[in-house]
Amino acid sequence: MDTMIESPEVLKGFKLILRALKHKNYRLFFGGQSVSLIGMWMQSVAMSWLVYRLTNSAMMLGVIGFVNQIPSFILSPIAGVYADRWNRRSMLLCTQALLMLQALTLAALVLSDVVAVWHLIVLALFSGLVNAFDAPARQSFVFDIIEQKEDLGNAIALNSAIFNGSRLIGPSLAGILIAATGEGICFLINGLSYLSIIAALMAMNITPKEHTVQNTRVLQELREGFVYVYNHIPIRSLLILVALVSLVGMPYIVLMPIFAKEILRGGPSTLGFLMAASGIGALTGALYLASRRDFKGTGRLIPLAAIIFGTGLIAFSFSRVFIYSFMLMLMTGFGLMVQMALSNTSLQTIVDDDKRGRVMSFYTMSFMGMAPFGSLLAGGLAYRIGAPNTLLIGGLACVAGALLCARNIPAFKKQGSRIQGFEGSSD
């Protein structure tokens, strides 16, 4: 009897969480990304393990991370201008095809046993250049394929859910495959997985939008975007916190092979499980956000999530037992996911339509563009003071930055009267 009473409520809850899937184009995007992202995470784990196996160097892990992510810092703002000018679906078809080529090249080099460190540096740089143009277009594209804009927040939360759900599956598969066959198969699977998102993009039926011919120069439009962000307190505050967390917190991923091998005395499977734990926590956070009917209390929740993330890193730096480390990765994944997804949703809600590509490019620059400096910094610090102390410092900095951001909540309320969710009230 209880089951009969509860079932309609459960069904209603699922419909609420998955409501963005009623849009056909978004369903295609969701399905294509679900497959492609599993391959991407497999490649990420395989790349870090391959680099550490070839070099046994924490510094080289940082270098690879740096060259892969630095193009986002340099080129994302310019890519954002073109995301506002060009057809975003065409941009994504091009970038996904190039990323598929990169993955298949990696697979060929590793499977033929001729791979060298310089190959990895060049190919990491290549994928970074492509991703610098892919990310702003992809972030803005979600807005284009959601007809009812009240479902935008749910769509972004579901994007985060599949991103982090794939982080649960991909690293676990990668750990098993690396131990059984080596890294090359992971790169091959990733290359083939891009076919799913390419097919999905081609199957979409999108009404072409009228693009006004731009008479202004790219640099002038770029300057307009910077001025717009600087004068908007909520946008500026969000981007600063995202940049800080990306600089001092996100590099924990780069250091995971060291924790798996040296601190916890494990192997590829240990690395895969730690990454999967972070994915479980992030997936939980994404489902939590998708289940919210609105985004009231966002002004308080974003810094709170950053504090949860930073506290998780601090505790993880002291752990020497796998089960504790696993549980703390759940915590960090949840905190990071909630902070980044809410920041993304809030920015998409705030921004004027004609500046969407540029603002999301600044988000990309803050999120992905600061990460290379963090990777390089983390690699250098880990070499000098050890990986645990490096993570401890990063966690403390994230907590401090979140507390400073929380002081701006009154400014959010003052300037954000037209912005859904930026009231300081809680749910």
Image (cartoon, rainbow, N blue to C red):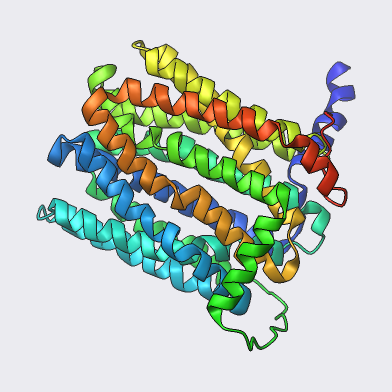
239 lies left or right of 210: left
Outermost residue, left side: 114
Number of numbered discs overlaid on the protein picture: 0
Quarter where residue 386 is shown = top left
Instruction: Please state the horizontal and vertical placement of residue 141, each as a whole percent of the image.
Output: 63, 65
Q: Which of 251 and 286 is in front in this view?
A: 251
Residue 23's quadrant in the figure?
bottom right
Question: Is residue 234 in sight in this rendering?
Answer: yes
Residue 243: percent from left, percent from top:
52, 45
Which quadrant of the rendered structure holds the N terminus? top right
> If the image is split into quadrants, where does the C terminus sit?
top right
Residue drawn at the location 64% of the way across and 86% of the way down: 214
Compared with 342, 226 (above or below) is: below
Residue at 73% from the left image edge and 47% from the top image edge: 154
Q: Quadrant of residue 299?
A: top right
Q: Relative to 80, say whether 295 is above or below.
A: above
Up-down: is 89 above or below 333? below
| 326 relative position to 262: left or right | right
> What residue do we see at 10% from left, 52% from top?
113
List x then y, in percent, for residue 80: 56, 68
| Closest to the observer, 305 or 320 | 305
Q: Can residue 50 be seen in this view?
A: no
Q: Where is residue 61 in the image (x, y as percent from the top left)?
A: 25, 41
Q: Which of 207 and 178 is in front in this view?
A: 207
Q: In this view, does 18 lie above or below 128?
A: above
Residue shown at the point (50%, 70%) measured from the top left: 78
